[in-house]
Amino acid sequence: MNLTEQAADFKAPPLQQLQPSLKTYQECYAVNVSSDMPPPILPAVCGGLTVALVLSVLYGLRRRKLLNDSIEREKKAQGSDSTELSDNRTAWAVHRYANTEFYQRQLRVLANLLHGAGYALSRNAYDSSRIMPEDRDHFAYQLEDCRLRIMSPYEDADSRTRRIEQAMNDGLAQTWLRLLLEGAAENGWYVTGSRWP
């Protein structure tokens, strides 16, 4: 007898034989089920109730977080409870306020210098490349000039030039450029398009 003949002779058992008996189901799951309730429905009901419970807990946690955030925003709007001007919250707020514009100007100058020298900026770390040494010195000089113009706007040109040259000689300007480039890279901005031969 070949496989085709065996398949033709095969008879599926009746559907009642495929379902577990109520007694077997009660023994496996240790539950009392009435005879009018089909056994496979109970796990679905339990599963549905479990999902509903989990979702309600997550909803409650989310609602609590939103409430806490709202309370925090309200506290900030009312001001700090501290009687000290030098408390941490005020110091951090002043730091953010004072430095945001400063760094935005520095980064704008850096981006213009990079584009002017034939470099580009990318969000892909694999495209990053090195800046040529002469470009690096030029960028450091220009960024130090920008920094001094922001921090000492009334300084005369000769004094500023001496301070820039001193910063170039002692490495401050190059360190400042490195910090800006590393900070930008930490935020996902990379220099590309190197002019290395």
Image (tube, rainbow, N blue to C red):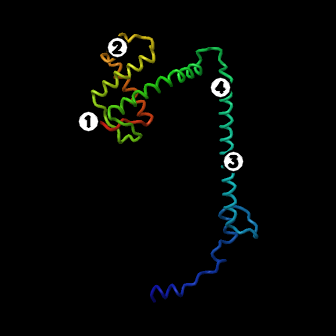
Q: Nearer the viewer, mark 3 or mark 2?
A: 2
Q: Earlier in the sequence, mark 1 or mark 3?
A: 3
Residue 1, label in figure: none
> Disc 3 residue type?
Ser
Q: Nearer the viewer, mark 1 or mark 3?
A: 1
Classify mark 3: residues with Cα within 10 Å, few (<14), some (14-19) or many (20+): few
| Residue named by callout 1 | 196
> Disc 1 residue type?
Trp
Inter-mark Cα distance, 1 to 3: 59 Å
> Disc 4 residue type?
Lys
User: With respect to residue 70, does 18 lie above or below?
Assistant: below
| Residue named by callout 3 | 56
Q: Earlier in the sequence, mark 4 or mark 3?
A: 3
| Residue named by callout 4 | 76
Inter-mark Cα distance, 4 to 3: 30 Å
Residue 161, label in figure: 2
Q: Is label 4 in a helix, a strand or a loop?
A: helix
Q: Are marks 1 and 4 in contact (CB under 8 Å)?
A: no
Inter-mark Cα distance, 3 to 2: 66 Å
User: With respect to residue 79, does 64 lie above or below?
Assistant: below
Residue plotted at (34% across, 21% down): 141
Q: Nearer the viewer, mark 2 or mark 1?
A: 2
Residue placed most toward the observer, 74 or 58: 74
